[in-house]
Image: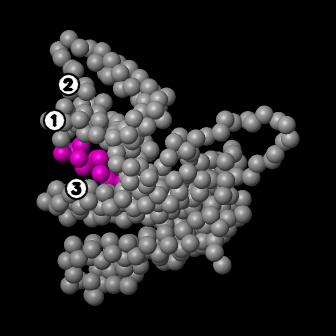
Amino acid sequence: MTTPDFPPPRQTAVPDAPSAQPQQRADDEPMRLITSFNDVFVVVASALLLFGTVWMTSALPPWLGALVSAALIWGLSEIFVRRRRMALPALCYSFGFITAFASVGFVGIHAVGGLSESGHLSPEAQGLSLNAQALFSLISSYVGIGIGTMLYWRRFRVPVTIAMGIGGVVCLTWLFVLILGENLIDAMRVANIVAGLAIFAWALRWDAQDPQRTSIRSDVAFWLHLLAACMVTHPIFWAIMPDYPVAAIAVFVLLSVISLVIDRRALMMSSLLYVISAILNVMVTSTATQSLAVVAIVVGGALLLLSAFWHPSRAAVLKLLPAGWRARLPG
């Protein structure tokens, strides 16, 4: 049986009544994080229930306790995500479910051949180096994240699930690199950019399947764009800031043009703090005590103008592209 797409919340139609909200345009990037205040109520109650469950199962083996938490989140998702279609609980439950499975993988490797209950290495693991043990834990966590992401996505079709699973893998990899030492950080930055570009291209494919942004594919693309933007922009700005502020401003301008072309604002948002810092480095002098205020006004005003005139600005940029490219982009 095919699982239906994650639909919009139910609305009660009132004949001849004016619309309570203006209709959103596709280029406004519609994003639903909350359907009602009941979402907040359910999330708080679920957090309390999960906290109590984790506390009560603390005497169980850690991997079994994590599975119990995952099962509880699955049951809550059946009610509040699959039936009630509540947005905020869906986001929180997907994070909790994937995290629980990542924990199963992490503690499971120690249960099989790692740390004993006394905290010492078991005989099978004494011959392994610390790096090898960390690598085994990392791989088992990858497997847990992959299983959790696949199960939750196939059942509940929550748009953020795919990006959240990939983001978990990225975060764990960075943690592993930091544990091993700083000699791998430069290579990790390059790998981060390459992986981010691959995710960016994948997000564009999701966008191409829904140019009018009316289905779940557009929501999946949004979260993938947000993840890709963080993975690509942060390593680039880490490399050029604070020594090359002018280059940082130029990169931001380039990212703004790309954002207009693909009709997504994630690239701009992920680099906003860096460009503010870069402009400050250019403007600050010994007498410029109000530079931060000036930069905030200039950048904020420019972004508001761009938001107000996003559609004509994008139309002007699209005219510079070949017709074949324009046909593949959102209209």
Is 260 in front, or is 82?
Answer: 260
> Residue 224: x and y, percent?
43, 56
Q: Residues within 10 Å of mark 3 (few under 14, many from 20)?
A: some
Report the Cα–Cα distance between label 1 and label 3.
Answer: 18 Å
Type of amino acid under label 1? Tyr
**Residue 157 shows in this picture:** yes
Q: Secondary structure at mark 3?
A: helix
Type of amino acid under label 2? Val
Bounds of the magenta span? 227-239
Q: Residue at x 38, y 52 (%)?
A: 325
Mark 2, residue position: 282
Label count reads 3
Residue 295's place in the image compared with 168, above or below, is above
Q: Residue furthest bottom?
A: 124
Q: Say which mark, if any, is on residue 244.
A: 1
Please state, as top left, top right, bottom left or bottom right, where the N terminus lies in the image.
Answer: bottom right
Q: Residue furthest right?
A: 15
Mark 3, residue position: 189
Nearest to N terminus: mark 1 or mark 2: 1
Is 19 in front, or is 123?
Answer: 19
Magenta stretch: dominant secondary structure: helix
Q: Residue at x 86, y 41 (%)?
A: 15
